[in-house]
Amino acid sequence: MRIKLKTYILSVTLFCTVNTLQAQSSNITESLTLEGCIARALESNYSIIISGNNLEITRNNVTLAPFLPTFSVSSRQSSNNSVQRNIDETGERVRSTSSGNSVINGANLNWRLFDGFSMFATREKQQELLRQGEYNFKSVAENLVMRISAQYYNIISMQNRLNLLNEVVSISRERYEQALVKYNIGSGSGLEQMQAKIYLNSDSSSLLLATENLKNAYIELFRLMNIPLDSKYSIKDTIIPEPQLDVKHLINNAEEFNTSLLALQAGEEVARLDTKIAQASRYPSLDFSAGYNYNLNQNGYYPSRYNESNGLNWGFSLSVPVFSGNEINRRVKNAKILQENARLSFESARQELLSEIQQLYNIYQNHLRMIEFEEESKAAALLNLEAARERYRLGSLSGIEFRDIQLSYLNTSDRRLNAIYQAKISEITLHLMAGELFQ
């Protein structure tokens, strides 16, 4: 009798704990939508903010500085005061003092008029770096949307599994209560009753673990959204895969709109412009300079008390590279190698992307097919389970056989949930690769 009492107390304790956790997780004040989660994350996620700041730096670096002159103003003032002691041939000491003051003011203008078109290539390079920065920012945003979407649908899948485990625990509790009644009236064995209790405890533990995982999944979603981790939100949604995607359409869009490929294309263009900048060193350069200087000198040592000068000066300077120890050839050669590496990196990434799309599309199709027959399997498993519950109640089915049927229903339902989730994740990833995620 004491064993029965302890068993019953343990069962009630587990049941109350599970219900308490579920009540805590369901104490939510507002529902979340996928669009709302994405909008909040794109607004306040730290990775987005950092990437946006980096893009702003790149945008600030796009200037007309390569074409504009430089202008500087300088001023210098200096003073001196010296005492000189001399001894003449009679031995008499002669002391003299001198002081001076100097003021130098100037304004200078320097303007490179021609540098082998390097200034034009530099300007284009700035614009390409900006374009590359925009693609990098978009890539960060796309990956964040992907992570938010995956976590959103993961929570839905986990909630569905939690409901499934609730159903399994309810069935196990019903079986345990029936086994306990049979044992009390002497028509069942204690072994069957204890075995039913073990199954109930096992299912209850799985339910506790699923509840814990669901709470942690919400915390991870809140972290990605950058909202308080103890926020009270819930997701009330279902996972509905889109109509089957067209792999040819995905491949065509990927080659044209994939963000990573576009960033690599911009990088290839930057490497080409670097080669052009290196080649510009072979051409002459023409500079214009102008300045205005004002000088004032005061010195008591000289006959004149001070002298003053001022005036404007200007001129052109032409520089023609003749020989630089093959330094220019070395820079051009290295720039061409880097340009070729950029092209090869693009081709390699393109090939890898197309391969990943083909492989992921096969996985995507497989999950869609799995959904169909897992739906059928779940329906059949549910019918078997309902029949098994009645047969077990009537005593024509053993506990082990009932457990096998129960686990068959659990596993079939689990596989169905996983197939739906994996199909959705594959679908989102394919849209990401094709550059269609924001569409």
Image (tube, rainbow, N blue to C red):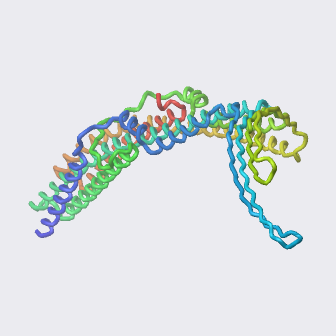
Q: Where residue 322 appears, x then y in whole percent?
A: 90, 40
What residue is shown at x 85% (from left), y 34% (from top)?
318
Choose between 287 and 424: the one closer to the eye: 287
Residue drawn at x 65%, y 34% as measured from the top left: 126
The residue lying at 28 percent from left, 42 percent from top is 233
- Residue 115 visible (yes or no): no
Please tell me which residue is depicted at 75% across the width and 57% down the height of the picture.
Answer: 98
Please give left or right for residue 222 compared with residue 146 in the image.
left
Q: Position of residue 140 (x, y in %)?
A: 51, 40
Is 49 on the left-hand or right-hand side of 349? Answer: left
Q: In this rendering, is residue 121 above or below 179?
A: above
| Residue 191 visible somewhere in the drawing | yes
Q: Position of residue 283 (x, y in %)?
A: 84, 34
Q: Front-most of 277 and 111?
A: 111
Residue 12 x %, y %: 16, 58
Residue nearest the observer in this picture, 421 or 38: 38
The N terminus: image quadrant: bottom left
Q: Residue furthest left?
A: 185
